[in-house]
Image: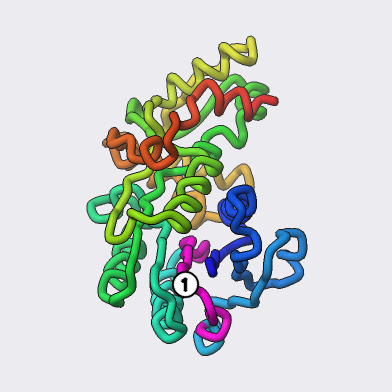
Amino acid sequence: MYAVTGATGQLGRIVIAELKKRGFGDKTVALIRDLAKGADLGVETRAFDYDKPDDLAKALDGVERLLLISGSEVGKREPQHKAIIAAAQAAGVKAVVYTSLLHADTSPIVLAPEHRATEAAIKASGLDYTILRNSWYTENYTGSLGGAVASGTIAGSAGDGKLTTASRPDLAEAAAIALVTDGHTGKTYELANDDAFTMTELAAEVSKQSGKPVVYANLPKAEYAKLLESFGLPPAAAELIADSDEKAASGALYDDSKALSTLLGRPTQTLEQAVALALK
């Protein structure tokens, strides 16, 4: 039996769909906080509230392999993840696949320490493990391209930094492969696209496909954070995004291992494909 945490999240839903497509739907359990939100998943669902650690082991009964999709509550993830790992041990889970952060062991991005701590806890647990160090989602950059076309500007703080992002569908497929196929025990994969792009190149591709002039405006981190707040983002989220963008300027979101395409057995999504999908 396979189980997926955060199964109603943006990544989790695609993982569930991928497992069903591969014929594992009847062997998959979706672990979710709100059962009502998982009614449309088409697999068994079990209540799984990270903040109720005493109830977690019961939900993992019969599970052999667990995909631990990192939680969304920044600042709370380390204790939440450790509670899940302890529950997996208590329930007799054999293996954990964890979605970490690109170069989590050395990354200067503010999210990295929670991932480092989780990786360490998994390795100390005695469980078989696979670490999937996911890059930033491509959709983080393409999700608001309609507004960029309208304004003629894409803003950020990444400078000329090379970005090897990855699409959610590609990362979800990789997670499903790591969960249900053999040969990944004890391995850590840096998962990023085959080809890098800069924000200037992203703007040029958007301009090319939309037929309208779009340029990249590089802003100081504080100014970019204020801009994000003006769009309605909470201050903490705006600061996190701006800080990560600034770190990307010095290579924090770049990797050339091509481990993602190797795991998938096919090329990763291209920038051209990502922009075309976003502008549909």
- Give me the residue at 23% from left, 52% from top: 106
Does residue 179 lie above or below 221 as drawn? below
Badge 1 marks a residue whose secondary structure is: loop
What is the span of residues highlighted in magenta in the rendered image? 57-73
Q: Which residue is mark 1?
A: 64
Residue 192, picture quadrant: top left
Does residue 53 lie above or below 112 as drawn? below
Does residue 137 belong to the magenta stretch? no
- Give me the residue at 44% from left, 32% from top: 266
Quadrant of the image containing the C terminus:
top right
Estimate the x, y position of residue 220 in percent, counting from the top left: 39, 36
Estimate the x, y position of residue 107 in percent, counting from the top left: 27, 50
Residue 157 visible somewhere in the drawing: no
Amino acid bearing label 1: Glu
- Give me the residue at 30% from left, 77% from top: 125
Q: Is residue 58 left or right of residue 41?
A: left
Residue 117 visible somewhere in the drawing: yes
Does residue 48 lie above or below 178 as drawn? below
The number of numbered discs placed on residues in the rendered structure image is 1
